[in-house]
Image (tube, rainbow, N blue to C red):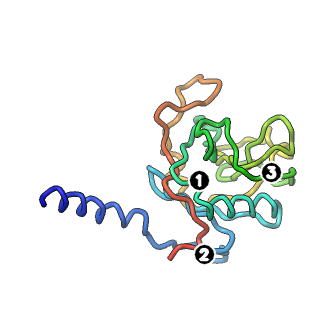
Amino acid sequence: MVRVAAVLFALVCALPALAQPVKLPAGVDPQNTIVIDTTKGRIVFKLRTDLAPKHAERIKQLARDGFYNNVPFHRVMEGFMAQTGDGQNFNGTGRSKYPNVQAEFSQVPFKRGVVGMARASDPNSANSQFFIVYGDASFLNSQYTVIGEVVSGMDVADKLKKAPPGSQSGAVADPDKMVKVQVASDIR
């Protein structure tokens, strides 16, 4: 009985972290906003449907499929970016069951808080993985699709476990995870 009570208590304590109401900045459309509850806290980003409508739809589809839940930030490089979205292999080599998305490049610069789609060498190979930029990454401009911008939680992104300094791959041992990813309008 004591064990059951302890488990119930632990669940009750954990639920508020995942059930926090979403307070969006004025003018942010909940239909096009992604809420990521991580092991470090909450990150919220607005999708740029004006720049990358196909990529935005893919991110929403995968969030609604539960594809991103419990997926690690497998590649995190200090001062550069945090990459996630491999719900297949969890190490950066996987993709979703859906076909790749054609590039939707824009003139929007990669700077702190911008969210971009990861891809292989083929510009039209973006599928499920995305990254959050920590600082100026202008060398990515017009080479990767900008899909959004963090509207709250960059302080949380900054706390994600990083790869060791000097790591070329940016691979993280025992990485932080996206515990739950949702479209803001779907949260009840």
Residue sitting at 65 percent across and 73 percent down? 28
N-term-proximal mark, 1 vs 3: 1
- Bin the neighbour count of mark 3 within 10 Å (Cα to Cα): few under 14, some 14-19, many 20 and up: few
Instruction: Find disc 3 in the rendering and name its residue.
Output: 99
Q: Secondary structure at mark 1?
A: loop
Q: How far is disc 2 from disc 1 in space, using C-alphas?
A: 17 Å
Instruction: Find disc 1 in the rendering and name its residue.
Output: 68
Q: Secondary structure at mark 3?
A: loop
Residue sitting at 81 percent across and 61 percent down? 54
Q: How far is disc 3 from disc 2 in space, using C-alphas?
A: 25 Å
**Dot 1 amino acid type:** Tyr
N-term-proximal mark, 3 vs 2: 3
> Which residue is farthest left?
2
N-term-proximal mark, 2 vs 1: 1
Q: Give the image quarter of residue 84.
A: top right
Residue sitting at 51 percent across and 58 percent down? 180
**Dot 3 amino acid type:** Pro
In this rendering, position of residue 5 left or right of residue 162: left
In this rendering, position of residue 161 left or right of residue 185: left
Q: Give the image quarter of residue 55.
A: bottom right
- Residue 128 position, x and y percent, is 70, 49
Residues at circles 3 and 2 in contact by the CB criterion of under 8 Å: no
